[in-house]
Structures are given as structure tokens and as C-alpha cells.
Amino acid sequence: MRNVACALTIAGTDPSGGAGIQADLKTFQELQTYGMSVITSVVAQNTTGVQDVHHIPLSMIQKQLDSVINDMPIHAFKTGMIANIDMMEAIKAKIKDLHIPYVMDPVMVAASGDPLIATDAQKFLREELLPLTTIVTPNIPEAENITGITIQSEEAMQEAAKLIVHTYGAEAALVKGGHFTGDAIDFLYDGEAIHRFQAKRIDTTNSHGTGCTLSAAITAYLAQGDSLYNAVKQAKDYITKAIMHSFDLGHGSGPTNHFAPRMEEIKQ
Ligand SMILES: Nc1ncnc2c1ncn2[C@@H]1O[C@H](COP(=O)(O)OP(=O)(O)OP(=O)(O)O)[C@@H](O)[C@H]1O
Ligand SMILES: Cc1ncc(COP(=O)(O)O)c(N)n1
């Protein structure tokens, strides 16, 4: 029996608190999971976009990973923004023997449209990191980038999820429909079956950090020992409530509300 579920995020930062490491740690905390973090890049960003990026030196990323891995229990981990091939190689070397659930949010571009990883790193991510994942959670542009297919229908989303598993070697793929119109429908393919997760589309422009929050919630539930299906189902519920009660903060696309799911439960 575990004392407490422990989850690690390896990602970039967001000083405005909506995305990246900050969103991940808030999500872990809300889901009663002990959160740990390794910072890859310090990003000057807010709800309106990315102002600047400072990459942490490689040796410091390696040392942060050693600090956590050599001392702490880790029951599941996620990766978010990993800006270049050198960082990806260093991280791969440290995580490949962990043998615990690995959730990859294949962050490529911020919701504001600003690129977050180098173009040549996309190939490394696809070929070297994807095969290590328990689940990868691309949005539609990321799924198009990984598979090379154009996604304009639910059928194409499902085809992309299957391709990511069978061609690129992820154990499972969750292709997210946040960028579509109509209901917010995500498809999970676990190597055997397609599962559909549907929520009403919430009429809001507050979508800063939705992908980070969803993947962090999946990581927290996996750290707690939930099955992949149950982790995704509960995480989808969490992000839907967090968007429903999102905050009108900042001058751009506002952040999700991490305590909304708990407040809704208290009200019931
Ligand atoms: N307006 C919305 N209403 C309800 N659910 C939404 C809405 N927008 C996104 N979602 C859901 O939020 C989750 C994140 O999906 P999305 O496709 O937005 O990811 P993303 O693009 O990686 O995130 P981000 O916009 O932060 O980059 C998915 O479960 C998606 O269905
Ligand atoms: C450090 C970091 N990681 C990921 C995102 C993507 O989040 P979003 O697309 O919601 O802006 C981001 N903006 N910043």
C-alpha cells in the first residue's frame, strides 16, 4: 500500500500560472498526488503569448533528474515542453529504465501560436520518445504533425490515434478534439479498442493550459494506480469542470480553474 501517490513533471514554466510546470503541480496537488518537477526551459509567457524563452543548461536538467530519481519514489511521470534534441536525448537516457507510466503531452506550439520546440526536435520526439510512452496526448495539429495525415473528421482522429500506436510505437494515444467545433470529443486508442470521451463544448476563450492540465491529471490518476481508461475518463471530467469554471484573468486566453472540480463535488 502506497503512503502517497508521487508524480513527476518534466516541462517548461509559465510565470502566469496557467500552463507548463505550474499547471501540472496545481493539478497534482488538487488530485492528492505528491508533485515533483524538473524544469527544462524558463518561459516568459502569459495569457497573451510567449515573450521570451531561456533554456536550462543540459547538465542542470540532468542533475535535476538525478536529484529526483535517486531519492524519491515516482509512480508516474509526464513530459511537456522539451525544446530541442539535446534535451530530449538527455531526458531519454534518464527515463528509459524507469518502467513506470509515462504520459507525453507532445507540446509543439502554445495556444497563442508561439512555437515551443525546435522543428528538427519534432522528428526525435516522434521516433525516439514516443515508443517509450504509456500514453501520448496530441491535439489535432500535433496529431497531424506526428502522423502526416490531415484531420478534419472524427474518423480521421481515430485513424491518427491508431497510427500513433501501430506505426510510432506509443502504447496508447489520446487524440484531443479541443481544436474542432461542436462537442469536445477526444478519442483514446489503447492498442485494442477505440474509446470516445465526449463533453459539451464550453463557450470560452480561456484555454491557456488545457492540454497541460489534462495530461497532468492523467499522470496523477496513473500514479494512484488507476487503469489507463479510468485515468483518462476522470481526467476528462476534471478538465471539463476546470474549463467550465475557468478564470477571466489576464488580457488574453485565461487559465483553467483547478479547484472547480472539488468545489462542484462539495456543492453536490
Ligand atoms: N471549449 C472547450 N470545452 C470543453 N472542453 C474543451 C474545450 N476546449 C478544449 N477542451 C478539452 O480540453 C482538453 C484539451 O484539449 P485541447 O485540444 O485544447 O488540447 P491542447 O490544444 O493541447 O491544449 P492547449 O489549448 O492548452 O494547447 C481536451 O479534453 C479537449 O476536449
Ligand atoms: C511551458 C509551456 N508548456 C506548454 C504550453 C502549452 O500550453 P498552451 O497551449 O495551453 O498555452 C505552454 N504554453 N507553456
Image (cartoon, rainbow, N blue to C red):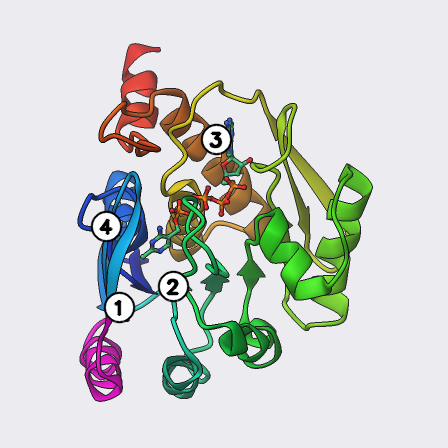
Look at the image and tell me in which quarter the C terminus lies. top left
Task: Give the x, y percent position of residue 61.
Answer: 24, 80
Mark 3 and mark 2: span between their CA atoms?
Answer: 24 Å
Query: Disc 2 versus disc 4: distance between alpha carbons?
Result: 13 Å
Q: Nearer the viewer, residue 149 or 167?
A: 149
- Identify residue for label 3: 237
The magenta segment is 54-73
> Are circles 1 and 2 on residues that touch, CB within 8 Å?
yes
Q: Is residue 4 visible?
A: no
Magenta region includes residue 156: no
- Tell me if label 3 and label 2 are in contact, CB under 8 Å: no
Front disc: 4 or 3: 4
Residue 214 horizontal side relative to residue 2, left or right: right
Marks 1 and 2, how far apart at CA: 8 Å
Sequence-first tag of 1 and 4: 4
Magenta part, dominant SS: helix
Q: Which residue is depicted at the point 34% across and 20% down?
A: 245
Name the kind of residue labelled 1 in the image.
Answer: Ser
Label 1 CB less than 8 angstroms from ligand 2: yes
Q: Which mark is residue 81?
A: 2
- The reply to whether discs 1 and 3 touch (Cβ–Cβ < 8 Å) is no
